[in-house]
Image (spheres, rainbow, N blue to C red):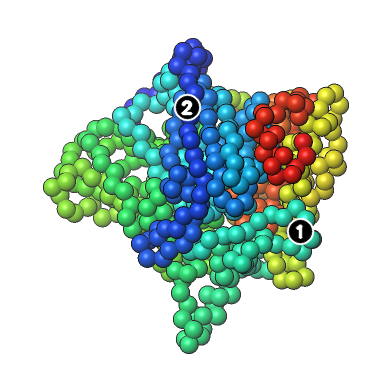
Amino acid sequence: MPLYIHARCVLAVTALAAAALAARVEYDWTITNVNLKMDGVRERRAVAVNGAVPMPFATASLGDTLVLRVRNELDEPTGLHSHGITNNGTNYYDGAGRVTECGIAPGSQMEYSIPLRQTGTYWIHGHHNSQYINGLRGPLIITNPAGEPYNYDEDIVLTFEDWMPKYSTATMEPSAGTDAAPTGTDATLTAQSSEHSCGCEAGGDEVSRGAAEHQSNATTPFDPSAKYPLGVINGKFGEDAPELNFEPDKTYRIRLLNIGSAFMFRFSIGGHEMYIIEADGVATEMQKVDSVVLGVAQRVSVLVRALPAADANYGYNFEIFSDVFPEYPGYNPRAYQGAVLYNDDIDSRVPSTIARDTVDDIFLVPLDRQPLLDEPDMSHDVAITAERGPSGIVQAFVNGVQFKMPERPSLLTAMEHCGPGLINATAFGRSTNAVVVPHMAILELRVLNHDSVAHPMHMHGYFFQIVERGTIGDPRSAVRSAHAPMRRDTTIVPPDTYVRLRIRADNPGVWLMHCHIELHMELGLALTLVTAPERIKGTASLPPDYQEQCQLLDIPI
């Protein structure tokens, strides 16, 4: 494998290179509805950017300003979240509807102007209602003009999506009652495996009970294609996976992104070795793996060295699976294969199957070896539970609170209280589940998953340190990170386990933390972190077109 450039050398020249090469990287995007047949058979409505699903590939460099000029041609507000971008100093461009922005009103446009102070593999997606389930998503790659930490010959991007069979209309209405659920005719929710499970289907009828009933009722055939999603890679149905063209002895960086909404993905390449070198934008020391597992919203880069001879072709394998949906042969899990081509004159491939061995992210080591933060100034439990309400609808809770969107963005509430002194969490309303953290305080979150399905927990505005994992109630199971813990923006919390995460509150703003299974968030599995509120500026600092959108949507500044 190639040697990497020492991290300190990269950091030493990064600032000079970024300053010399900084540019405004501009994208003009129009968001509309389109109809498409992802598998060539079943047509459904989708949310597109410039007519494309997924949205166009976005690239920029460290030091650039990313400019997204967005026009909304939908019949509801929209907006874009640049997932993993910390937005330090530009919290109002985080794109989270009714949390950091009012949204972009139908028939109007707004510009996001985001200085890029980080490199790596990210993505952009809708953060209003369930628009991102319906296709409003795509990759964002930020490179380093000073050179990447590892040497490679080619950069390959593979995006994985779970394409749901029906258009989702789930919303989070701020006025919903205590037993409310996402609204919309095709947002039916279901409990999977137990009455306390936060299972759901993103855009269709019930799966758990439906599958069991139809399997036992020959007069009503069960059609899994109407219930389960397709696996999609780079915007194509998994059966039409793109070919990877390798040349002998070359080294390839393959960026793997799960930009889906409910399912996990597993990836492996037959006959080749893979080394993880990045997770969620954070460069890592090389870690050999047989396969990579991606929870919803996670990204991983691997290095793959091509074989020395072009005397055979191979295959790469990817699998879509979920514990939210019941297992069903050929659909959950569902396997696909693409070609790794060395020689076009050879028709056959060396047979391979999906590999299983992988590595937990707590064992990854960041390349910069940032040390474990000091003992926390604040500790806060994030207890995840789910249950059926009186109407039979599944509800999700964090610390007994079902998150609901405020009538007015929480950022505007924080800005009203700008200046010395801490704002009280009650100012944001109980249903926002707000946690207020003073400037530069170290916060440790203990996320406890009491549910029966795994939850990919994502934090806006920060890369958290993964400090410890274990089984709830079993101290002997605890696994602590090394002196330099891995940092990510999304981590998977399996059922009946906990994870300890640590941040320093050095990014003033209002930041969501939520399960990235989209309808789990719609069910209420979220909280609001208000960090360094003493440093949040007043509403006068808001960009004019941001304020205009609030006025168009009748939301007072």
With respect to residue 257, does 121 lie above or below?
above
* Residue 153, image x, y percentages: 31, 29
Quadrant housing the N terminus: top left
Mark 1 neighbour density, 10 Å: few (under 14) some (14–19) many (20 or more):
few
Which quadrant holds residue 180?
A: bottom right
Of residues 490 and 41, which is closer to you in this image? 41
* Alpha carbon separation for disc pair 1 and 2: 40 Å
Looking at the image, residue 116 sits to the left or right of residue 308; the answer is: right
- Mark 1 lies on residue: 176
Q: Which residue reaches farthest bottom? A: 219
Q: Between 465 and 259, which is closer to the camera in this rendering?
A: 259
Identify residue type, mark 1.
Ala
Residue that badge 2 annotates: 25
Whether residues under marks 1 and 2 lie with C-beta atoms below 8 angstroms apart, the answer is no
Residue drawn at (30%, 54%) of the image: 352
Residue 537 in sight here: yes
Name the residue located 40 percent from the left edge and 50 percent from the top edge.
Answer: 235
Image mark count? 2
**Location of residue 391 in the rendering, given as x and y in whole percent from the top left corner:** 74, 71
Q: Which residue lies furthest to the left in this view?
A: 345
- Which amino acid is tagged 2? Val
Pick the quarter of the image with the C terminus: top right
From the viewer's perspective, is 414 left or right of 36? right
Q: What element does badge 2 sit on?
A: strand
Secondary structure type for disc 1: loop
